[in-house]
Image (tube, rainbow, N blue to C red):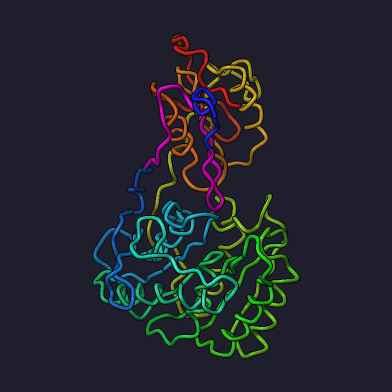
């Protein structure tokens, strides 16, 4: 590939329920950009000891209400993106965390061994889903033990949630007697093996059968009809295997969600799906449900009259390929945001958390000039400017 081709290459960053895109600019390089911590939720990052010798530090996002507590606790467990776990960004689950902080909970989101900035080496047992589940559950158990020693945590009021691989790990954890843990919530839980010839679906069914036989904690499962990883037929097999072997489970099989129900928990619009079911489950296991803290919604970007949303020609600075990208952006799901720079670079983000910040970060990673938001969701936020493009060649892709 030529140097010019590399400079024109499109940078795409994929994670659960997240799509961001940046245009490359000569003289710049893409890099991981740290998004700001959420002051509304007192977000911070702590390192939690884990492992057989407790010498592995897990990068853990912590949210909590103001004050010393003790607060009931929710621990949310992440999935696995394709590729190297070390390259997977820190999961935050801001939408779920916000709802729980409003209800007076502290929330912890640990990145397990070998993921993101956590220590240790990720272990993969291939098609052995029981081994995969138990291995990951070990980290969660260590987080529970650590949390119960913290003064801001009520050690007798803890619930666990997991999405995708985190859901499988959380159900594996339900085979243990964990002091203070009252319930476990599984959102689209499982692990899909990409490529190879192993029957990973049957292995999942067998794993859930064993977890059901050993189950000791009440569980709630939520799976959507258009989940791209686990279709309803497979979900029914996993549920039947778990429940027939004595597992305590409530299955909520909801309908389609947007393009892919597998991303529901990380979506702003997913709250209307999961929140009523979670509130019902929390009541059943004796956990708080009523909101007790005010958490402000993020301030919206002010709408401007710069141009109609679909007026592609009005977007400033963009080269022709950038205008094609903006036209494609208009077909994306909300929440979404599009950012531009006077250098001719652009960046956009679709779905997931903090799309405005992600769009700006994607654009800025590809620009030598400051980036600004052009549109958010379904309206334009750009103010009238007179500055002209500094580099008409930037932002092109091949």
**Residue 349 vs residue 202: left or right?**
left
Find residue 157 and report its horizontal and vertical position in percent: 38, 77
Location of residue 29 (image quadrant):
top left
Q: Nearer the viewer, residue 236 or 196?
A: 196
Please identify the quadrant where the C terminus is shown: top right
Magenta residues (range): 12-33
Residue at the (54%, 39%) spot, across then down: 12
Q: Is residue 82 above or below residue 137?
A: above
Find residue 234 and report its horizontal and vertical position in percent: 71, 71
User: Is residue 104 in view?
Assistant: no
Location of residue 291 (image quadrant):
bottom left
Residue at the (45%, 18%) spot, across then down: 343
Residue at the (50%, 81%) spot, across then down: 174
**Which residue is outermost to the right?**
233
**Residue 90 vs residue 270: left or right?**
left
Q: Nearer the viewer, residue 143 or 251?
A: 143
Q: Is residue 121 above or below residue 116?
A: below
């Amino acid at each position: 590939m030529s140097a010019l081709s590399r400079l024109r290459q499109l940078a795409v960053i994929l994670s659960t329920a997240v799509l961001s895109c940046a245009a490359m600019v000569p003289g710049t390089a893409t890099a991981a950009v740290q998004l700001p911590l959420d002051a509304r939720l007192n977000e911070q990052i702590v390192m939690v000891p884990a492992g057989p010798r407790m010498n592995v530090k897990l990068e853990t996002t912590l949210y909590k209400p103001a004050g010393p507590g003790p607060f009931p606790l929710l621990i949310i467990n992440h999935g696995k993106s394709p590729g190297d776990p070390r390259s997977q960004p820190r999961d935050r689950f801001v939408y779920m965390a916000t709802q729980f902080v409003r209800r007076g909970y502290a929330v912890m989101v640990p990145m397990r061994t070998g993921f993101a900035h956590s220590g240790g080496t990720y272990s993969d047992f291939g098609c052995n889903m029981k081994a995969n589940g138990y291995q990951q559950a070990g980290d969660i158990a260590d987080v529970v033990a650590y949390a119960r020693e913290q003064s801001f945590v009520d050690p007798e009021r803890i619930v666990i949630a997991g999405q995708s691989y985190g859901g499988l790990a959380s159900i594996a954890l339900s085979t243990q007697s964990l002091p203070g843990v009252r319930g476990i919530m599984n959102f689209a839980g499982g692990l899909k093996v990409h490529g190879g010839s192993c029957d990973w679906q049957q292995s999942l069914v067998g794993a859930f059968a064993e977890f059901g036989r050993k189950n000791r904690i009440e569980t709630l499962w939520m799976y959507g009809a258009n989940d791209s990883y686990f279709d309803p037929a497979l979900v029914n097999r996993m549920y039947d295997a778990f429940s027939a072997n004595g597992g305590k489970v409530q299955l909520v099989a909801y309908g389609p969600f947007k393009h892919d129900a597998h991303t529901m928990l990380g979506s702003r619009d997913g709250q209307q799906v999961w929140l009523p079911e979670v509130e019902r489950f929390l009541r059943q296991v004796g956990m708080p449900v009523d909101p007790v803290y005010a958490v402000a919604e993020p301030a919206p970007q002010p709408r401007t009259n710069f141009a109609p949303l679909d007026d592609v020609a009005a977007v400033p600075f963009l080269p022709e390929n950038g205008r094609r990208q903006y036209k494609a952006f208009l077909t994306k799901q909300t929440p979404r945001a599009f950012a531009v720079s006077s250098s001719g670079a652009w960046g956009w983000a679709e779905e997931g958390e903090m799309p405005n910040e992600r769009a700006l970060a994607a654009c800025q990673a590809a620009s030598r000039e400051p980036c600004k938001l052009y549109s958010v969701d379904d309206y334009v936020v750009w103010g009238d400017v007179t500055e002209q493009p500094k580099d008409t060649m930037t932002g092109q892709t091949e």
